[in-house]
Amino acid sequence: MKKTLLCLTLSGLVGFALTPAARAENPSDIRNDRQDARHDVRDLRHDNRDIRHDRREVRRDVRNGHPREARQDARELRHDRRDKRHDKRDLRHDRKDLRHDHNGR
């Protein structure tokens, strides 16, 4: 009984002592996650710019009576919005990875 208790205590202490080493993440992984997040933010800015442009184009084409061009611009607008949703999802994932990397998973 004493041996079991001693073994459990020692294994707990060893596990506790190794925890910081086990949690030390690869710095390149953190760097890659940060770089991915920066790229996603940049892509979101571009997506927002493209969406504003496409909305102006659709309004202009409708106002000027060009339905075919308006449909094409509306397709581009849907594509840009889909791309924005994808980039936002990527950014959330990258930020989650960064939090886990810093907190030691």
Image (tube, rainbow, N blue to C red):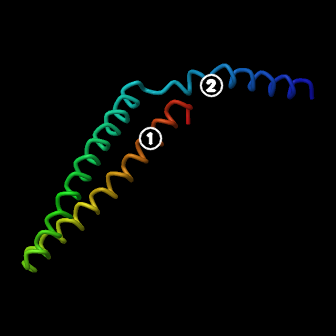
Using the image as rendered, state which of residue 42 and residue 49 is in the foreground.
49
Q: Residue, x 28% and y 40% (percent of image)?
A: 39
From this view, report whether residue 90 is shown above or below residue 34. Answer: below
Q: Amino acid at mark 1?
A: Arg
Q: Amino acid at mark 2?
A: Thr
Few, some or many residues within 10 Å of mark 2 (<14, 14–19, 20+): few
Q: Residue furthest right?
A: 1
Q: Which residue is mark 1?
A: 95
The image position of residue 68, as x and y in percent, is 8, 79
Q: Residue, x 31% and y 37% (percent of image)?
A: 38
The image position of residue 22, as x and y in percent, is 56, 26
- Tag shown at residue 50: none
Using the image as rendered, state which of residue 64 and residue 4 is in the foreground.
64
Q: Residue, x 39% and y 53% (percent of image)?
A: 89
Disc 2, SS: helix
Give the Cα distance between marks 2 and 1: 23 Å
- Mark 2 or mark 1: name the one nearer the start of the chain: 2
Disc 1, SS: helix
Q: Which residue is mark 2?
A: 19
Based on the displayed image, in which of its 4 quarters is residue 12 positioned? top right
The image position of residue 34, as x and y in percent, is 36, 33
Based on the displayed image, in which of its 4 quarters is residue 54 positioned? bottom left
Work out which quarter of the rendered image holds the N terminus and state it. top right
Question: Can you tell which of label 2 and label 1 is closer to the viewer?
Answer: 1
Using the image as rendered, state which of residue 83 and residue 16 is in the foreground.
83
Q: Residue, x 32% and y 39% (percent of image)?
A: 36
Q: Residue furthest front?
A: 63
CB atoms at circles 2 and 1 under 8 Å apart? no
Give the side of residue 53 with respect to residue 37, left or right.
left
